[in-house]
Image: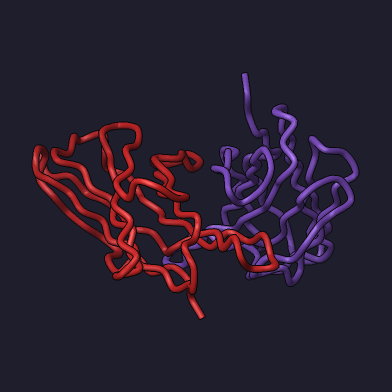
Chain colours: A purple, B red
Amino acid sequence: EAQVTQNPRYLITVTGKKLTVTCSQNMNHEYMSWYRQDPGLGLRQIYYSMNVEVTDKGDVPEGYKVSRKEKRNFPLILESPSPNQTSLYFCASSPRGTDQPQHFGDGTRLSIL
Amino acid sequence: AQSVTQPDIHITVSEGASLELRCNYSYGATPYLFWYVQSPGQGLQLLLKYFSGDTLVQGIKGFEAEFKRSQSSFNLRKPSVHWSDAAEYFCAVARPLNRDDKIIFGKGTRLHILP
């Protein structure tokens, strides 16, 4: 089954403790991206990647890192999480880029205390 | 500057009534336009998309949307809503002539259905 898989689905942690949210897709898609969803703000793009070893900042990249060492994986790294990063996070992928629909994962709810 | 505006945060309609959700964008050329739906606790699912050609596009679940260049709009419609349509709807834009490959989402419209 074609899918985008995020882990974990839920995480409660404390300020400053490094964490990684994994994202994997099995569709051989080139484009992958991360979004955060906050009430009243919709989805905002954090980072995106057009292909392996190519990553670019979205609209809200501060406090986040990403890497794209393999085509299928696009982890989101919070080196020193803070409470304002408490949010619902989505990973998405598409075959080539923004001219094609995004396939979304089921989301990761992060709470930073 | 925000590129996508969904003016209605909440909309309530009766089951069986028609629906129109508004989306306006700001961009100098024709963007790639999408509507997604998010049911509670789930990820986003594509309803329909527009890139070029016929300005009235059909999507899944009986939805359609019309691209109006003169109004910079891409409104989503459904002639008769069902209780299962209660969800949050997002309009999204990609800008093919920009140097970036970003996707901009609107803030969403939450649809409530009255029985």
Q: Residue furthest top?
A: A1
Q: Residue at x 29, y 46 (%)?
A: B56
Image x and y of residue B47, in percent:
39, 40
Q: Residue furthest bottom?
A: B1
Q: Above or below — where is B16 with respect to A87?
A: above
Give the quarter of the image for residue A73. Answer: top right
Image x and y of residue B66, in percent:
29, 52
Q: Residue at x 42, y 67 (%)?
A: A40
How many numbered circles does the render carry? Answer: 0
Q: Say left or right for B21 vs B79.
A: right
Q: Residue at x 65, y 42 (%)?
A: A93
Image x and y of residue B68, in percent:
30, 61
Give the quarter of the image for residue A39. Answer: bottom left
Image x and y of residue A43, in percent:
52, 59
Q: Above or below — where is A36 with respect to A101?
A: below
Q: Please identify the quadrant where the C terminus of chain B is shown.
A: top left
Q: Say left or right for A97 vs B70.
A: right
Q: Say left or right for B66 vs A72.
A: left
Q: Nearer the viewer, residue B63 or B51?
A: B51
Is residue A83 in sight in this rendering? no
Is residue B101 in sight in this rendering? yes
